[in-house]
Image: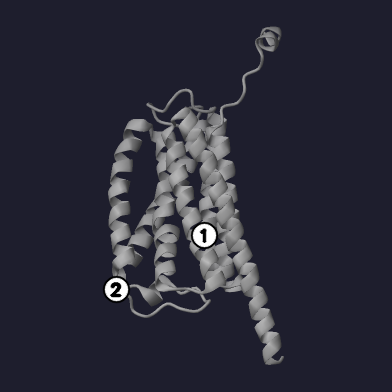
Amino acid sequence: MDFRSRAEITSTVQGVNAALAAAATLVAVSFALSTLDRWLRRGRPHDLAWSVSLALFATGAGALWWAETRGWSLGSFRLFYLCGAVLNVPWLALGTVYLLAGRAKGDVVRWWLVLLSGLSAGVVMFAPTRTGVSGKDLPTGKEVFGVAPRVLAATGSGVAALVIIFGALWSVYRLARHRAPAMQGVDRSAPSSARLVAGNLLIAVGTLVLSASGTVAGRLGKDRAFAVTLLIGIAVLFVGFLVASTTPRRAPVALRQRAA
């Protein structure tokens, strides 16, 4: 294989990676606007938490899109790491807390999360680096950062993912025992129990897909793995959001009377 053939293959691979990252960015932006519109119309706090999470997903995917097109820089990697590895899953988990634990407990978690987000932004954006960042290959946090940013990424995403997965399983367990899948204090105008459980399960699946980038990277490469898992994971998450937060339409009065 000559040099030109290798260059063409590399260019094609980078083009596909950029297209996948662009698709993930556009999907995340669309979903963020949708959940934000739902929050503006209904005022449900979990919609706002999901809007923030999806905006962070969109920013992380946008940084990946930029890097696949123009090449990585330290600034784009810091932004990708902050939004894509540290903050997005915790804000996603906040939506689960609001759905299952109610507004009062969710508000307490939200204020702590705001403080954590500010701390994380300061650490990741200004942390000293071990090496420069350049080229088209996605670097890893271990290659670039010291301990503090990596601890924030592992703790934030790991603990938040456990909250999402545990919340989904807890909802299933409660419903199987014919109990309400959410704690007292949750808005009773929320969707049905079955929808709440199904939505949380889909959100948990989407979270697992997003966390599978390391496994997928062994077959597709780091850049492709992040782009693919972002695109699929965000799509599954949004389906979960719609299922969990959409109230089924009630049958017309005449039909309900006839059924009775």
Q: Is residue 104 above or below residue 75?
A: above
Q: Position of residue 5 (x, y in %)?
A: 71, 86
Residue at x-position 52% and y-position 66%:
66
> In the rendering, at what x and y percent does residue 13 appear?
64, 74
- C-alpha distance separating marks 1 and 2: 23 Å
Q: Which mark is residue 92?
A: none
Residue 228 seen: no
Horizontal side of residue 245 vs 259, given as left or right: left
Q: Is residue 11 above or below residue 172?
A: below
Residue at position x 31%, y 47% from top? Answer: 114
Residue 40 visible somewhere in the drawing: yes
| Residue at (33% x, 61% y) in the render | 152
Q: Position of residue 179 (x, y in %)?
A: 47, 27
Label 1 is placed on what type of residue? Ala
Dot 1: element: helix
Quadrant of the rendered structure where residue 224 is? Answer: bottom right
The image quadrant where one finds the N terminus is bottom right
* Residue nearer the viewer, 205 or 228: 228
- Judging depth in this view, the residue of 127 and 233 nearest the camera is 127
Report x, y in % for residue 165: 47, 47
| Residue 128, disc | 2
Residue occupied by mark 1: 61
Q: Quadrant of the C terminus?
A: top right
**Which residue is depicted at the point 44% across and 37% down?**
46
